[in-house]
Image (tube, helix red, strand yellow):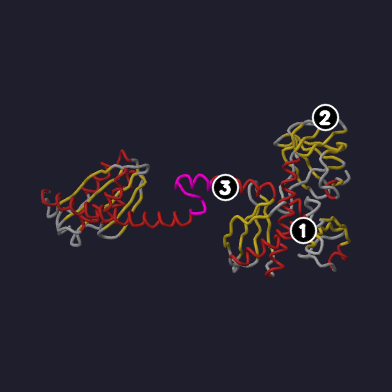
Amino acid sequence: MGKTERLYYTDSFLREFDAKIVDTSPDGLGVRVYLDRTAFYPESGGQPSDRGLLGGARVLDVIDEGERIAHIAERNPGDETVRGTIDWPRRFDHMQQHTGQHVLSAAFERTGGYKTVSFHLGTEVSSIDLDSDRLGPRQIEAAESLANDVIFEDRPVEILFRDATEASDMALRKPTQRQGEVRLIQMADFDLSACGGTHVRSTGQIGLVSVRKVERTKGHLRIEFVCGGRALAASRGDFRTLEETARLFSAPFLNLPVLAARQAEELRHALRANEKLIQRLAELEAEAWWAQAELKNGRKVLQEVFEATDSAQAKALAHAVAQLDSAVALIGVKGKPAALFFSQSASGRANLGALMGRALAPYGGRGGGARNFAQGGGIEESRLAEALALAHSLLPESPDK
């Protein structure tokens, strides 16, 4: 069987084509179809494969097998000659993102000498990893601006074919390891790269490149970006978010940073005040409990289950009990899963870290901590009372134990 002629190599804008079926074989998803020629792009170089139709059968995947390209169709197209139809919105989107990646990678190299070490074209955003994590906002914006300048200039994007030896002597942005004939993508006076992907005919068709997210990862800097139609969709999404947020603030969205900062500060003050109130309330509750609690075996034991909404109060109460004389708190908090807090006075005789583990083990929970304070969880809230009762029974009975 001969190799598949790759029509997309010379014409990325070819949407329909006729081809002969040269072989088929069963596949887990349907039928693996081989053609004498194809415009379907197989996943490669960070770009996903095309979708579309073969003789009316949906193409679920396209796989590069070296000399041949396999089309995973939902069923056998049947006829010897078949018409292929590319899912054009998906293809053009990929062309915008991939060509935009070339421009952006070249811009980072030109503005700071930063090289692209990997590229991924995702369903919503694409990303490149740069060989340094030392870039700041100004350097990123400089590369983004240069990339868009090149896009707005609408420079031609050309496909060239050269022998590998000749290509190695050309000003490639990244050396190629390919042998024989090499396919090159050239953007006039800006970038020359070896690439087998599909691309637009001029940089203006990219529309726009917009950096959306930056994160450091293992010595590299990951730049997430969108181009063309995705950039338009992202802009619309940003506007809707800003408009809705501005409505909540009853203010123009240009004022949102100041208003958000003010509310964040007010919230911090309110949270601190609330924490102080919870702590003071816990102290008062602990004192009231201690005043009427019965002293047994040299200690007073608070054993109680709280609702899930009172978790902060329960933990504060455990700490407050620990400040009293001869006191132990065995507190559970409902939830999925439930939580437990154990505490005791500084002179307490139990090792609460060990006690927590022993009390939770029969119920599949885990926990631990220090001698005088421990916490745990991972059990059903219906077993809280049992776990607390078990912990109570495991407390040392006297100073000698």
Residue at image x 65%, y 61%?
A: 129
The one of 212 and 383 positioned closer to us in this rendering: 212
**First of labels 2, 3 by sequence position:** 2
Q: Is the magenta stretch mostly helix, strand or loop?
A: helix
**First of labels 1, 3 by sequence position:** 1
Q: How crowded is mark 3: few (under 14 residues within 10 Å), some or many (20 or more)?
A: few
Q: How far apart are marks 2 and 3 (CA)?
A: 49 Å
Circle 3 sits on which residue? 239
The x, y position of residue 190, in whole percent, is: 78, 63
Kindly state the secondary structure of the residue where label 1 is placed: loop
Residue at image x 74%, y 34%?
A: 58
Write down the region rendered in magenta. 241-255
Circle 1 sits on which residue? 153
The x, y position of residue 232, in whole percent, is: 65, 47
The one of 359 and 341 positioned closer to us in this rendering: 341
Q: Give the quarter of the image for residue 221.
A: bottom right
Which numbered dot is residue 78?
A: 2
- Whether residue 311 is visible: yes
Kindly state the secondary structure of the residue where label 3 is placed: helix
From the image, which quarter does the N terminus lie in?
top right
Q: Residues within 10 Å of mark 2 (few under 14, many from 20)?
A: few
Q: Which amino acid does label 2 sit on?
A: Gly
Kindly state the secondary structure of the residue where label 2 is placed: loop
Q: What residue type is labelled 1?
A: Glu
The x, y position of residue 69, in whole percent, is: 80, 45
The one of 341 and 113 positioned closer to us in this rendering: 113
Q: Distance between the residues labelled 1 and 3?
A: 27 Å
